[in-house]
C-alpha cells in the first residue's frame, strides 16, 4: 500500500535504485527496481535521466507500461524516444494507447513525416486511420481529445441485455460509466451505468435513457469542454460532427489534464511569459536556459519600450522637477500604487470572463463597479498618503497633490484594468494576455501625466 | 438535444421565461419554463434573481432537482435559502444529496447552530451522523470531500458474484467505475469495472485486483489530492483514517471543482487580492462593492506602506537628484523593468513548486538558473537601454549608469523572484501569496538603491 507521505520518497528511492543499476550496467537489477511502479512515476524518473540512460530504462519495460510511460513523458524526452527507439516498437506501443493519447504523443513529439512513418507501421490500420483523423482536427479542439471507443447501446435492448453487452464490451472502450444510445450514428440518448443498475432487468434502454443530451462539436475549444464538464459534473462528454452524427467522447481524465495545463498557461501569461509549448509543458529543470530567455525576452522588450514613455513624460516636466526636487520622491510610490490597483482589477475581470460570469454586453456594469471600488480605494489610500507626506514634511500643498493623485490614479487604473480585458475579449484576443505587468506599464506613463499635471496646477512654487 | 452554441442562449431564454412567469405571478407557467433544465442552469438563473423571486422558483422544483440546485448555488443565495425556506424541506433536500455535497453546503452556508438544527431533522439519522463526521474534518482536507458510499467487494467473490453485487448496489453509491476490496475495514485491493469486464466469470476478485493502492489520509490537503488524481488519471481516490482503515473515497467530479476553484484562488493571489470565500466563490456581479474593497484594501495598504521605502531612498539621494535632474527620468523605467523581470521569475517558480518540479533542496540549482537568465536578459535590455539613453542625449556617463543598473536590477530581481517563493515554501507559507505586485514593490526600493549608488560612483558631475 502506497501512502501519500511516502510517495515522494518513493520516486526518490526509485531514482536511487535506477541510478545504481545503470551505474553497474545490471539489467536484472534495473528490472527489479522498476517492478510495481506506476507509469507516471517511471516517466518522472526518466525525465531526470540523461537521454542514453532514459532509453536503456525504457527498453526494460513491458509493452503496456512502456506505452503509458510514452504518454506521460514530457515533450523533450518523448521526442528523443520517438527519434531513437526502434520504430517498430514505437509503432506497436502507440497502437496500445487509447487513440486520443496516441494522437497526443504524435502531435507533440513527431514531425508530420515521422507521424506518417510510424502510423504506416501499425498492425491495426483501422486504428491508424482513426488516429490520422484525430490529428486532422485543430490543436486544442475537442476532436483532438476525443476517443472513438465508447460503449454504444441500441435503444431497444433490455437492461438485462445491456448488461450482457457491457460484459462483452471491447476492452479498449475508454469508460463504462456513461453509455451512449446510438441509432444510425445519431446519438439519441445517454445513460449512466448507475441508471442501469437501478433499473429492473426487463425495462428497455429507451425507457430509462436521458434524451436531454449536452454535447459539443468536434471543433469546440478544449477549455470550453472543460468548463462544461466542470459545470455539469460529467465523467464524459459526447462530441458530434457538424452534421450531427456522433464522433466520439471526451473523458474527464483528459479534462483534468487540460485544467492543469491551462493553469500553467494562465500563470505564465500573468507573469508576461510567452506560453510556448516547449516551455509550459516541460518540467522546470528540463528547459534549456536559452529557451527560458527566449520565452521571457519578447514581453520584457515590449514592456521596456512602452515604459520609456515615462521618461518622455518626466522630460516634458523637467522644469517642474528641477524646481521642486521633492516631486520626484513620490514617483515610484504613486505609479506603484496605480500598478497594484490595476493588477487587482485585471485579475478579477479576466477570471470573470473565463468563468463566463462577465460577458461582452456587461461592459457598462463592470465599469460602474470598478469605478466605484477605485474611488473608494483611492479615497482610503489618498488619506494615508496625505498623512505620510505631511509626516515627511512635504508641506500641505505637495501632500494634497499626492493625495489627489492617488485618488485619480486608483480610479484610472481600475478603468484601464477593467476595460482592456473586455476590449481584448471583444477583439477575440485572449484576455489572459493582458497581464499585470502590461497594465502596470500602461498605468505608469499615464499616471505620471496625471501627477505632474495636478502638481503644475496646484503648487504655488511652480507659478 | 442541447448543443454548445445554443447553451448560453438557452439560459438567457430560460431567464426571460422565468421573469415573464414571475411577473405574471403564474406558477404553472413557471413550472413549464423550468422543465428539462439542468440544475446547474437553474442555479445560474436563480443567482441572478432577487432573493424573493429565487425562493419562489426554488419552491416550484421537485425534490431531486431542488437538492442539486442547492448544491450548485453560490454561497450568498444558498445561505438565503437555508435561512428562509421551511427547515423541514431543506433538511429533506440535504439528505437527498451525496454526503460530501450536503456537508459542503452546510459548511459554506450555515452557522454551526443551524447546521445542527438541520441535521437533527433528517429522517436518516445514520446519514446525519456521517455528515457530522465529515464536518468535523478541517476545511479543504480530503475528509471534507470524501463520500462513504462506495462499492465494496469481498476478495473471495467470483467475477460473476461481483456483477450480481453491483446490480444490487445501494443506488447512493457515488461511483461504480472503481470497486474497493475491503477486509475488516482495511482496503486490500482496488479494481475497475473495466477489469471486471475483461475477466472471466469464475475468476476470484483477489486474483484480478491491484494490490498497489495509492491512497491519501483523511487530513491530506485537497490540492494534494487533486495533484495525485491528475497525475495518476484516477476516477476516484481512496481516503484512509490515520490508523489505516478505509474512511471513504473522493471522486473526480469534486476534484474538477477543486481545480477550478484553485485556479480562481491563484489568479486572485497573483493579483494581490485576499482569497476570502465570499469573494472567490461568488459570481462577479453578486459581490457587494464593500466586500470587493475589503478584499483588495489589505494588500494595497501593505504594498503602499512598503513602497514608501522608495521615497526614503530618493530623499537620501536628494542632492544627487537635485544636481542631475535627468537621473529621475529613468526611475520608472528602471524599477518597472525590475518589476517585470521579477514577475516572470516568480510565476515560473510558483508554478514549478505547485507541480512539484521544484523542491526545497533544489534552491541552489534554481538560483544558478535564474541568475544565468537574469544576467542574459540584463545584458540584452541593458544594451537597448544604453542606445535609448544616448538617443535622448543623456551623455555616455549617464547612459552607462542606466545600462549597468538594468543589468544589476535584472539579476537582482531574478534572485529575489526565485528565492522568496522558495523561502515561503520552506516556512510552510503558500508561495502563491508571493504575488507579482509584492515582488515589484520589493524590487522598487532596492532597485533605486542600486541605481543611485551606481550613479553616485560613476557620474563625474556628482564628485
Image (tube, coloured by chain):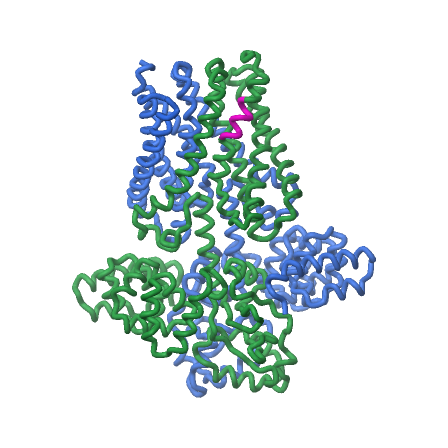
Chain colours: A blue, B green
Q: Is residue B43 above or below residue B342?
A: below
| Left/right of residue B311 with respect to residue B58 in the rendered view | right
Nearer the observer, B398 or B294: B294
Looking at the picture, does residue A325 appear above or below residue A118?
A: above
Which residue is at a point 52% across and 66% down the rendered structure image? B218
- Decide: is A313 above or below B126: above
Q: Quadrant of residue A312?
A: top left
Left/right placement of residue A282 relative to residue B28 reads right
Magenta stretch, main secondary structure, is helix
Q: Residue furthest left?
A: B24
Region in magenta: B445-452
x 61%, y 75%: residue = B189
Instruction: Tell me residue A439's x, y (percent).
Output: 43, 37
Q: Quadrant of the N terminus of chain B?
A: bottom left
Q: Which of the two residues, A439 or B427, is positioned nearer the viewer here?
A: B427
Q: Quadrant of residue B382?
A: top right
Can residue B229 be seen here? The reply is yes
Q: Is residue A238 shown to the viewer in this render?
A: no
Q: Residue A230: percent from the left, percent from the top?
A: 44, 61
Image quadrant occupied by the C terminus of chain B: top right
Amino acid at each position: 500500500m502506497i501512502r501519500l507521505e511516502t510517495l515522494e520518497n518513493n520516486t526518490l528511492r526509485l531514482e536511487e535504485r535506477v541510478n545504481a543499476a545503470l551505474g553497474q550496467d545490471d539489467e536484472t537489477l534495473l528490472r527489479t527496481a522498476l517492478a510495481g511502479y506506476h507509469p507516471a512515476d517511471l516517466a518522472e524518473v526518466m525525465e531526470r535521466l540523461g537521454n542514453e540512460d532514459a532509453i536503456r530504462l525504457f527498453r526494460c519495460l513491458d509493452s503496456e507500461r512502456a506505452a503509458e510511460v510514452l504518454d506521460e513523458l514530457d515533450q523533450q524526452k518523448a521526442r528523443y524516444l520517438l527519434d531513437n527507439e526502434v520504430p517498430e516498437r514505437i509503432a506497436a506501443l502507440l497502437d496500445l494507447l487509447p487513440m486520443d493519447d496516441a494522437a497526443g504523443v504524435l502531435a507533440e513529439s513527431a514531425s508530420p513525416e515521422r507521424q506518417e512513418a510510424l502510423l504506416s507501421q501499425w498492425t491495426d490500420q483501422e486504428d491508424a486511420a482513426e488516429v490520422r483523423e484525430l490529428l486532422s482536427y485543430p490543436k486544442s479542439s475537442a476532436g483532438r481529445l476525443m476517443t472513438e471507443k465508447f460503449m454504444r447501446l441500441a435503444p431497444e435492448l433490455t437492461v438485462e441485455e445491456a448488461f450482457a453487452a457491457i460484459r462483452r464490451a471491447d476492452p479498449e472502450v475508454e469508460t463504462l460509466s456513461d453509455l451512449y444510445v446510438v441509432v444510425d450514428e445519431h446519438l439519441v440518448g445517454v445513460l449512466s451505468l448507475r441508471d442501469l443498475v437501478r433499473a429492473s432487468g426487463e425495462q428497455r434502454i429507451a425507457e430509462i435513457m436521458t434524451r436531454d443530451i449536452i454535447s459539443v462539436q468536434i471543433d469546440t475549444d478544449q477549455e470550453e469542454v472543460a468548463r462544461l464538464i466542470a459545470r455539469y459534473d460529467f465523467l464524459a462528454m459526447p462530441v458530434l460532427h457538424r452534421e450531427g452524427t456522433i464522433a466520439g467522447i471526451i473523458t474527464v481524465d483528459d479534462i483534468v489534464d487540460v485544467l492543469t495545463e491551462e493553469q500553467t498557461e494562465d500563470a505564465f501569461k500573468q507573469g508576461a511569459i510567452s506560453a510556448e509549448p516547449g516551455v509550459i509543458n516541460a518540467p522546470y529543470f528540463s528547459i534549456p536556459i536559452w529557451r527560458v530567455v527566449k520565452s521571457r525576452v519578447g514581453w520584457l522588450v515590449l514592456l521596456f519600450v512602452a515604459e520609456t514613455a515615462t521618461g518622455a513624460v518626466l522630460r516634458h516636466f523637467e522644469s517642474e522637477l528641477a524646481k521642486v526636487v521633492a516631486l520626484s520622491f513620490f514617483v515610484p510610490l504613486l505609479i506603484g500604487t496605480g500598478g497594484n490597483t490595476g493588477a487587482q482589477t485585471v485579475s478579477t475581470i479576466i477570471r470573470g470572463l473565463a468563468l463566463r460570469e462577465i460577458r461582452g454586453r456587461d461592459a457598462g456594469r463592470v465599469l460602474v463597479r470598478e469605478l466605484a471600488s477605485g474611488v473608494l480605494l483611492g479615497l482610503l489610500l489618498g488619506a494615508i498618503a496625505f498623512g505620510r507626506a505631511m509626516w515627511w514634511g512635504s508641506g500641505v500643498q505637495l501632500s494634497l497633490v499626492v493625495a489627489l493623485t492617488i485618488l485619480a490614479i486608483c480610479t484610472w487604473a481600475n478603468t484601464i484594468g477593467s476595460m482592456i480585458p473586455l476590449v481584448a475579449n471583444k477583439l477575440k484576443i485572449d484576455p489572459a494576455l493582458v497581464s499585470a505587468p502590461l497594465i502596470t506599464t500602461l498605468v505608469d506613463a499615464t499616471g505620471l501625466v496625471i501627477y505632474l499635471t495636478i502638481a503644475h496646477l496646484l503648487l504655488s512654487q511652480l507659478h
